[in-house]
Amino acid sequence: MRAVFIIVGGLVALAAGAGVSASHERASFQWKLVGAGFSAPVHVASTKSQPKRLYVVEQEGVIRVLVAGKRRAQPFLNIQSRVTSGGEQGLLSVAFHPSFAKNRRFYVDYTDLNGDTRVVEFRANKAGTLGLPSTARQLLLVDQPYPNHNGGQLAFGPDGLLYIGMGDGGSGGDPENRAQNLSSRLGKLLKIDATKRGAKPQLAGYGLRNPWRFSFDGGTGDLYIGDVGQGNWEEVDYVARADTGLKNYGWNVYEGDARYSNNPLNTTGKLTAPVYVYSHSIGCSVTGGFVYRGKAVPAARGRYFFGDYCSGRIWSLKISGGRATDVQPEAQRLRDLSSFGEDTHGELYAVTLSGRLYRLTG
């Protein structure tokens, strides 16, 4: 099958499994299995105050913890009784406050028993080893009209604010045109001062279909978003840290960089085209990842890794001058690739819904 990749500013055609750049031949990356037996893991996270700990979020409503690579029997948090799980719903991510060592605050995004999105703050015990369900404080509640396109990613930005990814609310094609409607919180990237009582979410971006996974580069603060497409194109969006101001990512007027509908485009803010898209001939649901900032794989430093849930394909690329360059497809595939994550040292991990945890190696 011929795989066609469109990069903003140019067209690169590669034969799947055969078209490999010279740089790809110089540095082929692998993913080593380092854990198994998780129940539908959908996210991996860490906090700088605990360099030996890695947290794995299970969709049903449990956060598992690994210490020095070994899984503890007792979960860090269990809120299964509050979570609707299945399909695209569930406990979808966790983000630890940058000052977790002092304030013990962490945040989760989940779909509640009514199927609506909740972003909730919890606190851990004094040792920081156990989340306390009784400490719940709600930051955000968003009604979900359909059971899909919930977004679900939480991440602290370089500005210290908590960023929240919201999908367009579901169904197909954004039938109520919520992503371009600034009065709706669906189809948006929101940000909030998480520790300020009474703080309201602010708009950081809109025109998103389902930003299932996004991340900030630990070295530069730049933003990368993997926005899941409709029927033809998957996309990766990029915003440099210095490029401030509201961004419109185009959905549902555009899918990737192709026209999708005749709906009017909201002209508030800056229309931001994807830096990379790929066709549904080789995948169907992008899983956004991270820029590698670790030390174990020197050749990977500065490269953004992402993949596709359906095909299990993984790619990496570099950004130069605001464009995607040196795009490398990897031979190894991880089926049911649900999320990437990084530890406190910048090493990258990936999880699959089949319950496996992998680490990037050379």
Image (cartoon, rainbow, N blue to C red):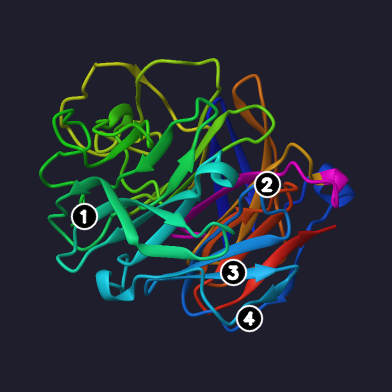
Residue 254, horizontal then vertical, whole percent: 31, 35
Which numbered marker is on residue 65? 3
Residue drawn at 37 percent across, 41 percent down: 164
Region rendered in magenta = 280-299
Which residue is labeled 2 in the image? 316
Determine which quarter of the picture holds residue 322: top right
In the image, what residue type sits under mark 2? Ser
Is residue 98 or residue 347 the one in the foreground?
98
Q: Tell me the distance, in whole angstroms, between the alpha carbons under discs 1 and 3.
A: 31 Å
Q: Amino acid at mark 1?
A: Gly
Q: Quick one: which residue is furthest to the front in this view? A: 126
| Residue drawn where x is 20% and y is 51% of the image | 169
Labels 2 and 1 touching (C-beta < 8 A)? no
Q: Distance of mark 4 from mark 3, alpha carbons?
A: 13 Å
User: Within 10 angstroms of label 2, few (less than 14), some, or many (20 or more) residues?
Assistant: many
Is label 4 or label 3 in front? 3
Q: Is residue 60 left or right of residue 98?
A: left
Mark 3 or 2, nearer chain start: 3
Question: Label 2 vs label 1: CA separation?
Answer: 29 Å
Tell me the element at label 4: loop
In space, the residues marked 1 and 4 are separated at their CA atoms by 31 Å
Image quadrant occupied by the C terminus: bottom right
Q: Which mark is residue 170?
A: 1
Residue type, numbered disc 4: Ala
User: Is disc 4 surrounded by few (<14), some (14 to 19) or many (20+) residues within 10 Å?
Assistant: some
Which of the numbered marks, if any, corresponds to residue 36? Answer: 4
Residue type at numbered disc 3: Val
